[in-house]
């Protein structure tokens, strides 16, 4: 079970209050009419599946019902940080200690 | 922006506000009336837990920008209650204003004053805000007594210890696999706001969970 920090409630809550919502920081092509099929297809269908650091969206579904971002290590499942929508992650790569 | 959209935006916002209470020919019925109207269980002399429904209350969801001074002033003018901080509740007489989310609050009060309070809020507030009458969609349960905290410990994953859940705190969390907005009204006094459609289930769960603590059903007096 995860014990997840909600940046809006400012508290740790049980995982059953949350839902994962997939990869974070995806930006919709500024002008969909002008982009190629490949660019649009990549935006709609293709997601990263990294080994290690992954930034993802979670929602505090049974709680404040706010969406926020989480940085999670996909190898250890450890949640390294959670941060509000619109802000940038502080952790973008694993430290030596986390890798070992 | 198309012309049609511009026109629609320029139109003054029309909001349907109505008296949601049925007239006397159609009596209002709480979602737990089938439990609370026929209380057959024996009342213990010295109950560890008391459970009753605070039926047919006014529940108004209030949304707006917490950072806006105008919004905060308007809410205070209409309700007499300041906007509570995160996970807090302000109470004055029958009315209570609870924090639900950074831009959402739950206002509860006497059942027959929903329309008057909604009108008063709409009178005082301006700009980007929402007032939604949820009175028919949820109901309020009260759990009290020295063992009430133990019932909650069995029923929800949230830490309800005194040091983590002091009087005045309000938390929306999982309760019995359903959802409840739990408020600590007093040391041994808790208020649970649950969805109408889950009220029967939650009631039965709490009755079952309270059996070992000498449960007494119904209002204390």
Image (spheres, helix red, strand yellow):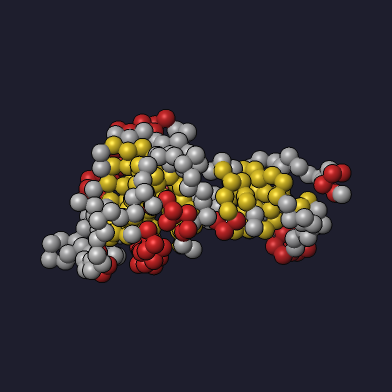
Residue drawn at point x = 24 percent, y = 61 percent: B43
Of residues A8 and B129, the one nearer the viewer is: A8
Q: Is B187 on the left-hand or right-hand side of B221?
A: right
Q: Position of residue B32 (x, y in %)?
A: 29, 65
Image coordinates of residue B156 in percent, x first then y, are 49, 56
In this view, the residue farthest toward the front is B45
Q: Residue furthest left?
A: B25
Q: Is residue B158 above or below residue B23?
A: above
The reply to whether residue B113 is visible in this rendering is yes
* Residue appearing at x 54%, y 49% in the figure: A66
Q: Is residue B122 above or below residue B24?
A: above
Question: Can residue B65 be seen at all in this image of the molecule?
Answer: no
Front residue (pair B55, B120): B55
| Left or right of B86, for residue B133 | left
Q: Measured from the top left, where is residue A58 in percent x and y? A: 62, 54
Left or right: residue B215 versus residue A14 is left
Tell me what residue is drawn at x 60 percent, y 56 percent. A15
Quadrant in which residue B72 is drawn: top left
Which of the two residues, A22 or A32, is positioned nearer the viewer here?
A22
- Residue B144: x, y in percent? 33, 50
The tally of labels here is: 0
User: Looking at the image, which residue is at 70% across and 62% down?
Assistant: A44
């Amino acid at each position: 079970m995860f014990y997840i920090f909600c940046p809006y409630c400012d508290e740790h809550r049980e995982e059953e209050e949350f839902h994962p919502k997939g990869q974070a920081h995806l930006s919709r092509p500024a002008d969909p009419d002008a982009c190629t099929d490949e660019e649009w297809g990549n935006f709609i269908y293709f997601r990263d599946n990294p080994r290690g650091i992954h930034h993802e969206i979670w929602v505090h579904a049974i709680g404040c019902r706010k969406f926020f971002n989480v940085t999670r290590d996909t190898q250890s499942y450890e949640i390294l940080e959670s941060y509000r929508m619109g802000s940038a992650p502080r952790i973008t790569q694993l430290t030596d200690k986390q890798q070992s | 922006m198309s012309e049609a959209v511009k026109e629609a935006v320029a139109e003054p916002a029309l909001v349907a506000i109505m008296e949601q209470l049925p007239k006397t020919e159609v009596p209002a019925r709480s979602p737990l009336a089938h439990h609370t109207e026929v209380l057959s269980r024996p009342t213990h002399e010295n109950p560890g837990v008391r459970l009753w429904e605070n039926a047919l209350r006014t529940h108004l969801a209030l949304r707006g920008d917490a950072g806006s001074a105008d919004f905060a002033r308007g809410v205070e003018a209409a309700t007499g209650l300041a906007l509570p901080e995160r996970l807090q509740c302000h109470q004055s007489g029958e009315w209570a204003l609870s924090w639900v989310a950074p831009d959402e609050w739950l206002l509860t009060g006497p059942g027959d004053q929903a329309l008057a309070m909604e009108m008063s809020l709409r009178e005082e507030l301006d700009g980007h805000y929402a007032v939604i009458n949820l009175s028919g969609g949820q109901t309020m349960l009260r759990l009290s007594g020295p063992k009430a905290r133990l019932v909650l410990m069995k029923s929800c994953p949230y830490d309800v210890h005194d040091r983590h859940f002091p009087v005045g705190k309000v938390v929306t969390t999982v309760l019995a696999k359903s959802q409840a907005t739990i408020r600590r009204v007093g040391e041994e006094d808790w208020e649970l706001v649950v969805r109408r459609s889950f009220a029967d289930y939650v009631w039965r769960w709490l009755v079952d969970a309270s059996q070992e603590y000498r449960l007494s059903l119904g209002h204390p007096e």
